[in-house]
Amino acid sequence: MKFLSSLAQHGPSLREIYESFISESYSSITLADVLSAIAVDAKSVITRRHPLGFTHAELTPCVGAPVGERFRFHFWLGNAGTRDDLGDLHEHTWDLTSLVLAGEVDDTTLRASLTPMGTYQGSRIIYGDRNSSELVGRFNLETIESRRVPAGTVYAIPSRTVHLNTVTMVPTVTLVRSIEDNRGEGPLVFSTPSATTVSATPARLRVDTLDALDALTVALDGGSTPVATSHR
């Protein structure tokens, strides 16, 4: 594989990268080191296609994070991938801190107001062996803040904050730490009301971790390409 042939022989482990992240030593974390560390632990890293169009590598088992905390690696390539019908506007059930390692992200936060004649319908995700969703009601959404986050920058999103990320170029790569709020309810996702029934993606497609890293490396070698596609 192209990626394997370019690996550095020595570098920090995923645990060491995680420790740098939680101590906020972000400037010491490089994309090359993260890629190499994931490759070393590839057999322990589960990688999937996310319903919002990016590739998601679960690093949590490799770093010894406490219960309720996750550490993940996300990247977007040249296409949106397969997204479900519920749309891109959503909230999380955790406090999120994200370090942009390559590319650029536009993040917009919004306020959701439950109202019978709202422009959007809100659906709550129910996680399980097969994910599902249930309709909560109609909402209006008001933009609170928009920000551009370039490579080398960190941004944070509090739990239950409605937001939308727009990847402004590909490839874009982020390293993400999240801490669950333990409220029990799944996240809300907002979509335009439809005459047809919409639902969550039942299961996320698993992909080979080294194949995914290889595709990312090829994309990085090709340079950045501007896009205007909503994700996350």
Image: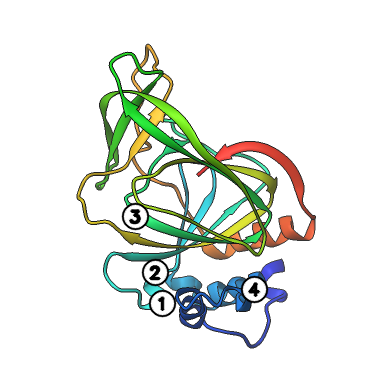
Mark 3 surroundings within 10 Å by alpha-carbon count, few (fewer than 14), some (14 through 19), many (20 or more): many
- Displayed quadrant of residue 25: bottom right
Q: Is residue 28 left or right of residue 132?
A: right
Judge whether 174 appears above or below 142 on screen. below
Residue shown at the point (50%, 71%) measured from the top left: 42
The amino acid at mark 3 is: Trp
Res 228 quadrant in image: top right
Q: Which residue is mark 3?
A: 94
In the structure shown, which secondary structural element does the residue marked by tag 1 occupy?
helix
Q: Residue 155: percent from the left, percent from the top?
A: 53, 57
- For label 2, the crowd category at 10 Å Cα-Cα, with few meaning under 14, some 14 to 19 and many 20 or more, is many
Label 4 sits on a secondary structure element that is loop
* Residue 30 image label: 4
125 sits left or right of 23 in the view: left
| Amino acid under disc 4 | Thr
Check residue 60 in the rendering and tell me which mark sits there, or answer none: 2
Name which residue type carries label 1: Val
Q: Earlier in the sequence, mark 1 or mark 4?
A: 4
Q: Residue 202 in the image: x percent, y percent?
A: 33, 39
At horizontal 31% and vertical 30% (from top left) the residue drawn is 123
Give the alpha-carbon distance from disc 4 to disc 3, as whole Å: 25 Å
Residue bearing the label numbered 1 = 63
